[in-house]
Image (tube, helix red, strand yellow):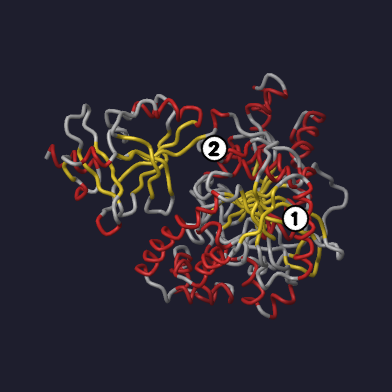
């Protein structure tokens, strides 16, 4: 991958800040970087920002700098001021086309995706869009009409996909941060094959608004960075409204239990197995408890992603193009999407219902372990192997990735060394929903050289809460949420395992949600709010008996704390489950 030899740029966020504090102006640095990126002959970038548009961005940065009291104040209020980043080409960036690596699909977005807007609001500058496996379908980085990308460590081996260009851009030292997406491992495999950090957040923690869907119910926006502090800085900005909290924030936590595969997947090659064994020895030496676990149940979940009806979700963005102009699609991508047409919506809904039950059973794993650690990929194929067998070479790469989003968990890929042949070795940490910051800090214990990550302030850490009655938006007790800093996140519905009762003699009127057998329940409308973690205790103190806070299972498969009623309280209460929710019941009374 050739580039202009004379242009050198900073690599990490700390390098960029030092360079700015030394030079004082972003103009020369960013202009030189854009020039350097334009020289690259490998298909890393599909579109770069126009020089005139960059001039506008530079002027924006200058105005923000003039308004800041000093450098420290600037970094405090705009932690990514002047930091360049790139975005995978299924993520909208205003002023640049979105193609999802398919020229026939190209459109001009009218605004930034929410994740891009969040980084820009923190002062960052998007310099371009990166190559990818077409429609985010693949883990190899070779399914693009713009050309395949190799790993920066080996010209013979794949870069990993589908976020290939974003990973290569960071690993090459062009930009310190890049956005990708991850459905089955696309934010983890490219990080592994290029020796960098890859963050796959808890589903829903980072907004997918403005992202071309691959499998909408599973997609996550991911982050690539050189080290843990940079990854944490980006995650803090991207999750500003819903910072996850978890007990492992303490970077010096002891007695941490990490589960690893008792028996390797049969596709794990000798090189990977040996490197992982060395890593486990190092974990024991650092005081962490690495304990074996049977991964058979996780493998069964992983198989559902491509052997079940979830593949039908991939038609959401592509069905029209597949019918109108199938030749516009990469042959392998077309083969996968054509097979997706065999599944019905009913099969997909049934699979989601079954998965929700499976998730509840498998989540018991988190009573045994604080985190899991796995080889990021069983092997790294060459470009020639992918050309010879596109489906087969790709198939096994997600062995330790595919189950994570299906189960609603988070993951973090970190480099762990290199092979005798000079290729990167990597491992992936996996945690329960909301453990994003825990994984970043745990990674620091596993690989201290990747840098320490500061946990976000308590005021920014938020926990989700389900409201079903008088605390719903616009109703009498909603102020108890808003006065404590509550933020409305989304409308939702419970699984059909609950009944709703109107409690007699309450002021204001309140319902009670009670769990029952699946065959006896109904789905109930609700709202998910988030509260600052430090305010949850104050909120609990306001909940009168017979109501309390318990775990509520939602239709989307998530489990969230929310209002539940005690069974004795509804013995003489009116069953209003047939209305489907408290608002509908209130409307029926006023009609």
Q: CA distance from mark 1 to mark 2?
A: 30 Å
Q: Nearer the viewer, residue 160 or 283?
A: 283
Residue 277 visible, this orientation? yes
Please tell me which residue is depicted at 55% across the width and 47% down the height of the picture: 94
Q: Considering only vertical position in the picture, is 276 above or below 336?
A: above
Q: Nearer the viewer, residue 374 or 192?
A: 374
| 198 lies left or right of 332 | right
Q: What secondary structure is found at the residue carrying circle 2?
A: loop
Write down the residue under mark 1: 280
Q: Where is the N terminus found, in terms of image quarters?
A: bottom right
Q: Where is the C terminus found, in terms of image quarters?
A: top left
Please tell me which residue is depicted at 45% across the width and 65% down the height of the picture: 313
| 189 lies left or right of 422 | left
| 589 lies left or right of 453 | left
Q: What secondary structure is found at the residue carrying circle 1?
A: helix
Q: How many marks?
A: 2
* Mark 1 vs 2, N-terminal side: 2
Rate crowding at label 1 as few (under 14), some (14 to 19) or many (20 or more) other CA atoms within 10 Å: some
Q: Considering only vertical position in the picture, is 569 above or below 281?
A: above
Write down the residue under mark 2: 243
Image position, residue 558 (x, y; %): 44, 50
């Amino acid at each position: 991958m050739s580039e202009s030899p004379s242009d050198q740029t900073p690599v990490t966020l700390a390098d960029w800040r030092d360079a700015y504090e030394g030079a004082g102006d972003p103009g020369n640095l960013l202009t030189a970087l854009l020039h350097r990126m334009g020289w690259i002959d490998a298909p890393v970038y599909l579109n770069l920002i126009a020089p005139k548009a960059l001039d506008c961005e530079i002027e924006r940065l200058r105005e923000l700098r003039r308004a800041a009291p000093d450098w420290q104040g600037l970094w405090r209020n705009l932690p990514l001021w002047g930091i360049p980043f790139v975005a995978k080409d299924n993520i909208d960036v205003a002023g640049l086309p979105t193609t999802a690596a398919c020229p026939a699909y190209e459109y001009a977005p009218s605004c930034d995706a929410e994740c891009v807007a969040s980084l820009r609001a923190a002062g960052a500058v998007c310099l371009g869009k990166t190559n990818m496996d077409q429609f985010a379908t693949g883990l190899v980085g070779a399914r693009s009409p713009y050309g395949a990308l190799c790993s920066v460590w080996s010209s013979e081996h794949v870069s990993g996909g589908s976020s290939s260009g974003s990973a290569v851009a960071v690993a090459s030292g062009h930009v310190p941060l890049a956005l990708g997406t991850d459905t089955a491992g696309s934010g983890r495999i490219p990080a592994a094959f290029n020796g960098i950090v890859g963050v796959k957040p808890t589903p829903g923690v980072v907004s997918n608004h403005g992202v071309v869907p691959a499998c909408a119910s599973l997609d996550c926006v991911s982050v690539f960075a050189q080290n843990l502090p940079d990854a944490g800085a980006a995650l803090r900005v991207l999750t500003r409204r819903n910072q996850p909290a978890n007990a492992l924030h303490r970077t010096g936590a002891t007695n941490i239990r990490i589960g690893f595969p008792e028996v390797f997947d049969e596709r794990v090659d000798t090189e990977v197995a040996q490197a992982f064994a060395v890593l486990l020895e190092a974990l024991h030496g650092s005081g962490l408890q690495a304990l074996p676990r049977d991964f058979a149940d996780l493998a069964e979940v992983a198989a559902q992603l491509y052997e079940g009806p979830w593949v039908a979700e991939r038609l959401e963005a592509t069905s029209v193009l597949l019918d109108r102009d199938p030749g516009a699609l990469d042959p392998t991508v077309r083969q996968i999407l054509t097979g997706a047409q065999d599944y019905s919506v009913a099969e997909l809904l049934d699979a989601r219902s079954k998965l929700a039950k499976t998730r509840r059973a498998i989540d018991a794993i988190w009573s045994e372990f604080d985190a899991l650690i796995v080889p990021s990929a069983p092997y790294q194929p060459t470009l020639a192997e992918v050309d010879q067998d596109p489906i087969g070479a790709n198939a096994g790469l997600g062995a330790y990735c595919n189950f994570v989003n299906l189960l609603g968990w988070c993951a973090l890929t970190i480099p762990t060394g290199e092979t005798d042949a000079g290729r990167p070795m990597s491992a992936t940490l996996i945690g329960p929903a909301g453990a994003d910051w825990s994984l970043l800090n745990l990674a620091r214990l596993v690989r201290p050289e990747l840098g320490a990550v500061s946990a976000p302030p308590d005021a920014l850490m938020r926990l989700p809460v389900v409201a079903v009655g008088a605390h719903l938006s616009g109703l009498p007790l909603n102020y108890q949420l808003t006065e404590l800093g509550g933020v409305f996140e989304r409308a939702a519905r419970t699984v059909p395992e609950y009944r709703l009762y109107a409690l007699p003699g309450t002021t204001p009127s309140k319902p009670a949600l009670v769990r029952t057998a699946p065959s006896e329940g109904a789905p109930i409308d609700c709202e998910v709010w988030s509260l600052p973690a430090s305010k949850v205790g104050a909120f609990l103190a306001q909940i009168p008996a017979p109501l309390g806070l318990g775990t509520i299972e939602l239709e989307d498969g998530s489990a969230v704390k929310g209002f539940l009623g005690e069974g004795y309280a509804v013995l003489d209460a009116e069953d209003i489950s047939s209305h489907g929710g408290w608002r509908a019941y209130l409307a029926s009374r006023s009609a």
